[in-house]
Each structure stands twice: as structure tokens, then as C-alpha cells.
Image (spheres, rainbow, N blue to C red):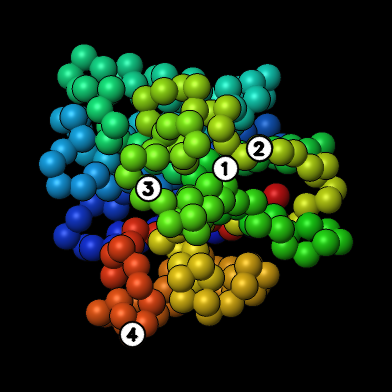
Amino acid sequence: MRIELATAPGDRHHPNEDYVSVALPASGSGGALVVLDGVTPPEGGDGCVHSVDWFTARLGGSLLELSGSRRDMPLTQCLSEAITRTAAAHSSTCDLSHPLTPQATVVTARWNAQRIEYLVLSDSALLIERTHDGVTPVLDDRIDRLLAEGRRLAPLRNVAGGFFTAAADPAVSRKAVTGELPRGEVRALAALTDGASRWVETFGEGDWTECFALLRKEGPQALIDRVRAAEDADPDRTAFPRGKNHDDAAVVFVEP
């Protein structure tokens, strides 16, 4: 088994709001990965006394524990329970009904000798290298479709007809992209927050297959380093428009 991960803040003076981790059971059979991208609120607050990195650490830790230890629970149920636990940890101090209450994108996957299961919510990415069919990206494309329609995203977060993130409502797990594959059909997996997938989606340095090849050959840190180099080459964001010059980035690569 090969497991490599890397993460880096977009701004060294600001906490990294991404979360990435892997759990392996004591039995040595199977495992689980979780990658979250915390959503930075705009000026004006989010009704919460806690930081976004506090939220992603809580949610990510709960989701990893449940995904890894509760094989009887579907990943959607694991996410619902993780959201419920995290909400309970700060419901007495924070306004969880605020539309910008701390939230995150989610990628989780788990595997054993028989199958691989996955869940993707919002704009982080899961890449699956198939035994015979190359690299398949698993994407929740709702944000891309809304932008293509010229829609403003702010009023469309976690509402019908919009896009969805993990915040305080456990029912959001039903909006995730999910699936499973026989274990024998999968060679490797990679999960990326959008700060790392910029290499493909913003800078056009390669496609998903080339991105996966880079991860296999050089590892997650090399991908993040290449994203940083592309960002530094366009400091004014004129050649490649984007919300932030540098963004938090997290990547995990797994050969189960």
C-alpha cells in the first residue's frame, strides 16, 4: 500500500482551512480518506465564534472516524452523523442558522478487499484510476453549471436549485455524488481540494489524467509546488482570473 499526502496554506499568516487525513484499521485490511476544504466567510462574520479551521478539524475528524470504523453505515450516513456531532459541539455558542455558518466541501472514500466507496460534495475532486479505463474524475459540478448560467453563487448556497456544502444540516449528505466500484477495478485514488486542482481547472497545465500521472510519479507536494509556481507567475490574476492569488491546497494519493 502506498499513501502520500500534502497540504499547504495559501497565506502563511492565515491558518490552513483545508483538512486531509487517512485512517487504516488495526486489522490491516482496508482504509478511509477524508479531504475537506473549509469555506472562508466574507467580511461581516458567519455567526460563529470559532474559526473555519476549528470546524474542518472537528468535521474531518468525526467523518474519518466514522468512515473508517462504521462499515455498517453508508458514507452518506457517516457524513450526516459527522455534521450532527460537529453542530452539537458549538450549537450553544453559535448561530448555526446563519447562512454562512462554517462549512466545507467534502471528499471521502473507503476501501476493503471487496469494494471501494466514495462521496463528493461541492467542488473538491476525487480521481479514480481504473484498472482498464484510465482516470475517471468524480466531480460535483453544480457550481460550474451555475457559473456557466451566469448565476450569482452567494444566494444559492445550500438552497434548492443551488449548490451544497457540509455546514450544520445533516440532510445535505443526500445531495452528495456517491458511488462504489469493485476493488479489483481500481488501481489508485487521489483527492484534491480546489486549491490543488487549479493545476487543471484554472491554469490548464494538464488534464486529469496528466494530473494523476504527476501525483503517481512525483507525489502530492510536487503538485502543490507547481500550483504555487503558476500562481506566482500571475500575481495580478490577469492571465488566470481567480478569487485569491494563493489558496489553501490539500492532496492525498492512495494505492490501496
Residue kind at label 1, given as amino acid type = Val
Q: Is residue 67 left or right of 46 when viewed as pictured?
A: right
Q: Earlier in the sequence, mark 2 or mark 4?
A: 2
Q: Would residue 172 appear left or right of 236 to someone viewing this image? A: right
As shown in the figure, which amino acid type bears the numbered disc 4? Ala
Residue located 70% across and 50% down the image: 256
Q: Quadrant of residue 165?
A: top left
Q: Which residue is mark 4?
A: 233
Relative to residue 174, is residue 233 depicted above or below?
Answer: below
The answer for how far apart the CA atoms under marks 3 and 2 are is: 23 Å
Q: In this orientation, does residue 30 appear?
A: no
Q: Which residue is mark 1?
A: 120
Q: Secondary structure at mark 2?
A: strand
Q: CA distance from mark 4 to mark 1?
A: 31 Å
Q: CA distance from mark 4 to mark 3?
A: 28 Å
Q: In the rendering, at what x and y percent does residue 246 appear?
A: 30, 67
Give the residue at mark 3: 153
Residue 178, numbered label? 2
